Amino acid sequence: MTNFKSLLPVLGATLLAAQLGLAQSDQMSFFITSAGPGDGANLGGLKGADAHCQKLAKAAGSKKKGWKAYLSQAPEGKMKAVNAKDRIGKGPWYNSKGVKVADSIDNLHSENMGLGKDGSLTEKGDKVNGRGDKPNTHDILTGSNADGTLASGAAKEVTCNNWTSNTEGSAWVGHHDRQGGGTRPNSWNSAHQSKGCSQPNLVATGGAGLFYCFAPK
């Protein structure tokens, strides 16, 4: 016969783990996408990127709404310039393990934030491969300067035509592990330009078409 008393500690531990997992996913307000849409830097524009953030967050158990991709947009036609930092609220933000990564916009764009390979986790709580790992996927799409504003240049050159191109052009990327090469190798959001906008070109640069997602307060 089953000894139900002996099962109580196990059931209790399982319930506690489940509660902790739900609490962490509910607190989560920042993550790196565990995967991009798979079409290079063609994310379907800001709207498509936001929807991808929402989809991944929901699948991970988050009940938060209004997730935003940390991406800038260049002025082109009827499109207005958008700064990534203006899309994500005021903070604070927590990763998928419930660890605070930044208190505010100013803190997020300072040297004192908690981003890096250990802090910048996916919505699933996993670390993302960085420099020295195989494959290296530390390039994160942003189209931004280090202060979170739109990078200088035409839409085609800095945002892969406002995140709709999977062929020609390039995009500014950051290094989530804060190391590597480029103009600003230690920058999480503005390290260098990609080699192109296609999935193979992003991979060749050291990325995978990943981007940051934030839940505005």
Image (spheres, rainbow, N blue to C red):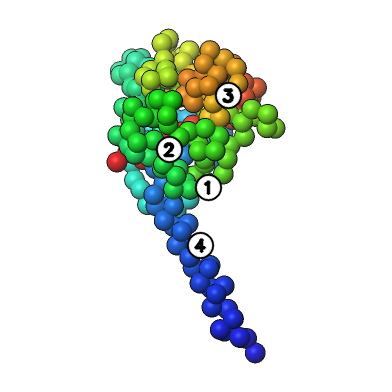
Between disc 3 and disc 1, the foreground one is: 3
Which of the 4 image quarters holds residue 93?
top left
The alpha-carbon separation of the residues under discs 3 and 2 comes to 18 Å
* Disc 1/disc 4 C-alpha distance (Å): 15 Å
Q: Residue furthest right?
A: 134
Left or right: where does residue 179 sit relative to residue 105? right
Give the label on residue 179, or none. Answer: 3
In this picture, residue 116 sits left or right of residue 62: right
Q: Earlier in the sequence, mark 1 or mark 2?
A: 2
Looking at the rendered structure, the secondary structure element under dot 1 is loop
Q: CA distance from mark 3 to mark 1?
A: 23 Å
Q: Which residue is mark 2?
A: 101
Q: Position of residue 71 (x, y in %)?
A: 41, 26
**Please, what secondary structure does the residue beneath circle 3 have?**
loop
Depth-wise, is mark 1 or mark 4 nearer the camera? 4
Check disc 3 and give the amino acid type. Gln
- Disc 1: CA contacts within 10 A as few (<14), some (14-19) or many (>=20): some
Toward the bottom, the furthest residue is: 1
Which three-letter amino acid code belongs to the residue tagged 2?
Answer: Val
Upstream in sequence: badge 4 or badge 3: 4
Q: Is residue 118 above or below residue 20?
A: above
Residue 146, percent across and down?
Answer: 42, 19
The answer to whether any part of residue 39 appears in the image is: no
Q: Which residue is mark 4?
A: 17
Residue that badge 1 annotates: 124
Q: How many marks?
A: 4
Q: In terms of sequence position, does the residue under pointer 2 or pointer 4 come before the other?
A: 4
Q: Is residue 101 above or below residue 77?
A: below
Label 2 to label 4: alpha-carbon separation: 23 Å
Q: Earlier in the sequence, mark 1 or mark 4?
A: 4
